[in-house]
Image (tube, rainbow, N blue to C red):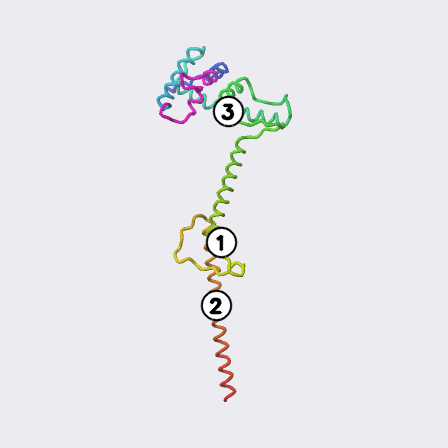
Amino acid sequence: MAKQRAPNFTLQENTLLAHLMGEEYMNFGMSRHKLDRHRFTSQISSSVKKEMWSNVETTFNANSTGPHRKGSDLEKKWENLTSTQRGIYQDHQRMLTLTGSPPFNSKCTILTEAVMNVIGKEGVDIMGIGPSSLDTSILQLTDMRDDDQQDAEINRTMCTSRYTPSMAENGYRSATISPPDKPSPSCCSHCSLHELNALKKRKLELQIQLFEAQLARFDEEYIIMLFVIILL
């Protein structure tokens, strides 16, 4: 016999669950939702969160006229509500930015407001002075890009300090590049590229010196050969 599926949550049940998750839980100084999302500490352990959901189950069923709901079902339902209603609220704010004011086809309901009041609207978008809203995801990407630029600047400074050419007595920078006696570990990709370019340049200088020596020897042999021909 197939297991009977539990009936869907009604609007009243969803609203009741949102109300319970927004209430402060015991003496933790935070709502049930924040406690559930909080990282594990010495005071907030997995057993504390399990007890919290057990408390939600008891309180929910005591105030609901619907069927009995298990704590695990309430936990899954709340996870679903926070995800779906956040998306609905984002679409609502986006449409509000484009049109300026209602009416427009929006799925935002009383349940959306109830859920967003618990999880926090500031976590979805930031309303500025202008009429447009800015997603916090854009701010996070901008911060990551700034961090990458700062790391690049630091690496570039380190590379410059390691490979700054010396000044000659006449005030000009010396163009001679001497390879290090011992290979030093590269601190970054920029250092590795700089070392590779330095080795390539050194190789070209040695090849030029070799060609000049071969050319000089060829000139000497050519002069000797002409001298012998004249004597003959």
Using the numbered discs, state the Cα–Cα distance from disc 1 to disc 3 in whole angstroms. Answer: 56 Å
Q: Residue 61 versus residue 228: which sits nearer the camera?
A: 228
| Residues rendered magenta in the picture | 18-43
Percent of width and height locating residue 15: 49, 16
Using the numbered discs, state the Cα–Cα distance from disc 1 to disc 2 in whole angstroms. Answer: 25 Å
Residue at (45, 23) in percent of width and height:
79
Horizontally, residue 127 falls left or right of residue 74, namely right
Which amino acid is tagged 2? Gln
Which amino acid is tagged 1? Thr
Residue 25, relative to residue 193: is it above or below? above
Residue at (45, 58) in percent of width and height:
199
Using the numbered discs, state the Cα–Cα distance from disc 3 to disc 2 in whole angstroms. Answer: 72 Å
Residue 209, numbered circle: 2
Residue 232 included in the magenta stretch of the image: no
Pick whichever of labels 1 and 3 is earlier in the sequence.
3
Tag 3's secondary structure?
A: helix
Residue 84, numbered circle: 3
Tag 1's secondary structure?
A: loop
